[in-house]
Image: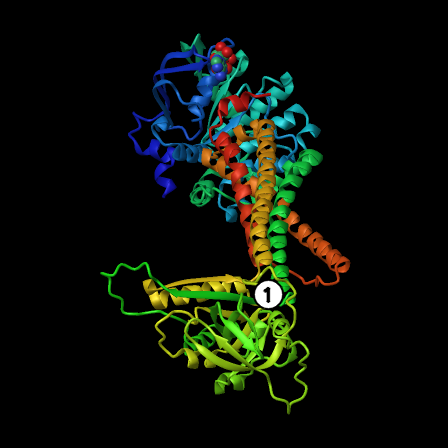
Amino acid sequence: MDFRVERPGGAAQSSSPGNSSVLELTDLKLDYVSENRKTEVLRGLSFRIDLNATSSRGHKIAICGPSGSGKSTLLYILGGLLRPTSGRVRVLGEEIWNWDEARRARFRAASIGFVYQNFHLLPAWSVLDNVMLGADYVAADQVPMLRERAIGLLNRLGLKGLESRTPSQLSGGQAQRVAIARALLMNPQVILADEPTGALDPATAAEIMGIFDEICAEGRTVILITHDEGVANSCEQIIRLRDGVLDRLDEIKSSSVDLDAKLGTVSTADREAAGHISASQMVAKDSAVRTNLFQHLNWRRAFGSSWKLLRRNPSRNLLTLFGVAIGVAAVLSMITIGRFARERILESYDRLGVRSFRLWGYTNWNLPISKPLETYFREFKDEELAALTRLFPDLEYYSPTANFWGAQVSYGGRSVTEDVNMAGVNEHGIRLNEFSVLAGRGISAIDVLERNAVCVIGSGIARELELTHLDFKNHQSEKPLLFVKTGRLNFACRVVGRLAEPKSASSRRGRSGQELILPHSYVRAIRGESPNSNEGDFNNVIFEVRAGADPEKLSKHVEQFFKQKYGAAGDFRASANNRVLEQMQRFLKIFNGLLIGVAFVTLLVGATGVTNMILVSLGERLRELGLRRAVGAEPRDLRAMVIGESMALCGLAGIVGLVSSMLLLHLVLYGVSLAFPDVKFVWTFDILAISMSLISILSVGIGSGLYPALRAEQLDVVAALRAE
Ligand code: ADP
């Protein structure tokens, strides 16, 4: 956007001289409405003050009238800070109340400077910072130039060397000079002054009026409210108000003579030597200054004002921020602890030797007959399982299992007819099913390859068949030959080993000790490849995963693999092999959810604290917010400022929380590892936990600033400026 087009002076000059006016009001009305009560303050104000096109000097206009007649109200309307209820307002030929807020703010920043009766300096800020307030709303590269200009203005106003003082270290006259320097910073065309000498003694008042005359001499228009008839009479025009209407418009002809006389006291050379930049110089610089007036979020400024905010009430504010730090720490530790516990559970899978899971697969008998299938599933094939281990390298071992129920076993005139649990497995089957061989040997790879007619028996069967004395040590002796009979199969096998008593009976089906284990290839051989009964089908497989892999997760993958391969033809189900750990994982999930819930609540409490703290601080900073709007901030600049402050504060607190909780956490984990020797200490830089913490810092920053930001955006500027 080209600001020169909008340059109010330019616009005024571009219109025909007869039309150009300093001020033009038509039936201006303003009502204050509060608690359903309407106060009519301005009640149809109309007048026009024309420019003297031939004069290079500005104009000095006084607004007079009894207290309560609406003078300040009028001034705020002219400055674009208070929207009139009705009527038209032209300032320097511009109908500023027809513009949007942004354009009005720009106009205010570039063309209007405010001076107040009580100076309205920010007490905690240095003199230079006070003068530089408007520089917050220009591009960063313009700031050094404005700083130079601010120092020049202070020098010129006789405040050399006082830049770093605070307002409380200044006299009234000095304070008002600082306020005037602030108003002049952006080289405005109009100065609006609300009783600028009202709080000063007569001598100081005269000095200040002298400065206003100089300002006028530079081509600026000064509109000031005054109760002092002497001051009023030094102006070219006096707008006299009474009860919200125009009482009289006085024109003082003689004033120009007085002013010209005074003007001689400060030569142009003096002013430039004192650092003053002439109006013509500033016009060129102005357009550059104003090209980037809308940086809504300035981090430097946000951190600066957050720092000031912190310093104002350190103990209270640090306590509040402590809440955020704790919240972020909670998020980080909860996630890290959750993940840490998960890893430890995986380790305990390893330690307990349960790195296994079981997969079941059956023909889907519930399929409608009308639906022909391309695939058919009856049982797991060995080639298929071997291929699976290549597809999922984390599957280390597997064994297919076929179960037979109700087999009868006899030897030497004795027989076992009840609860015999006959199974065909491969060379890993015994170990994977958590059996161990007490005497003799298990099923070997050779047995599987050669389809050897061998078997391993459980301790119960060994007892009933009186084979417990066998230690299988004598390789020469004949191995006992068992006769086995199931529903339709009759076969024999030689006993090559005996199983130990099972450690825990709970996890297995059937009566423990009644096992009869055979090579699966032998089972297939005696059963035939396509038996007409389903007994002896390889409907389940037990897998063992590599150390460190998650059996639970792999079981899901494998299940999914078969579901996809066979579709509706089969029913597949996989589950990790340990109930206790499964339960533990489930519990851990709930526990984790709870932890994160707690972290979330903590964060919410912290955020509420910050919201409150910023709201309180905004209440204390009403004056500052009002002044910011007066020097050209848009409502959304204030919104951005508050969000920026909130983010800076929460960011600061959050990072402190993040780092300290990380240290603390590792300290605790280290302590735990000392107390429990089987827990190994590892540095855990959990990317997920850290990024979740950063996300929560960001959201708390935005979240807690949001409401105060909206309040700042909707600020009643006039009320803020009038607030004590
Ligand atoms: P002056 O500057 O001439 O003393 P003001 O413009 O400050 O007068 O105020 C004009 C009138 O408007 C006063 O009677 C004042 O009480 C009233 N007034 C000012 N602000 C408000 C407000 N926010 N709500 C209601 N009345 C207000």
The residue at the point 32 percent across, 62 percent down is: 568
Question: Residue 491 placed where, x, y %?
Answer: 47, 80
Q: Does residue 584 lie above or below 22 as drawn?
A: below
Residue sitting nearer the eye, 68 or 276:
68
Left or right relative to 362: residue 161? right
Question: Residue 645 placed where, x, y %?
Answer: 57, 40
- SS class, disc 1: loop
Label 1: how many Cα within 10 Å (few below 14, some 14–19, many 20+): many
Residue where numbered disc 1 is placed: 512
Residue sitting nearer the eye, 633 or 25:
633
Q: Does residue 85 lie above or below 672 as drawn?
A: above
Q: Amino acid at mark 1?
A: Ser
Total labels: the figure holds 1
The residue at the point 61 percent across, 74 percent down is: 465
Does residue 147 appear in this view?
A: no
On the rendered image, what quadrant is the N terminus found in?
A: top left
On the rendered image, what quadrant is the C terminus found in?
A: top right
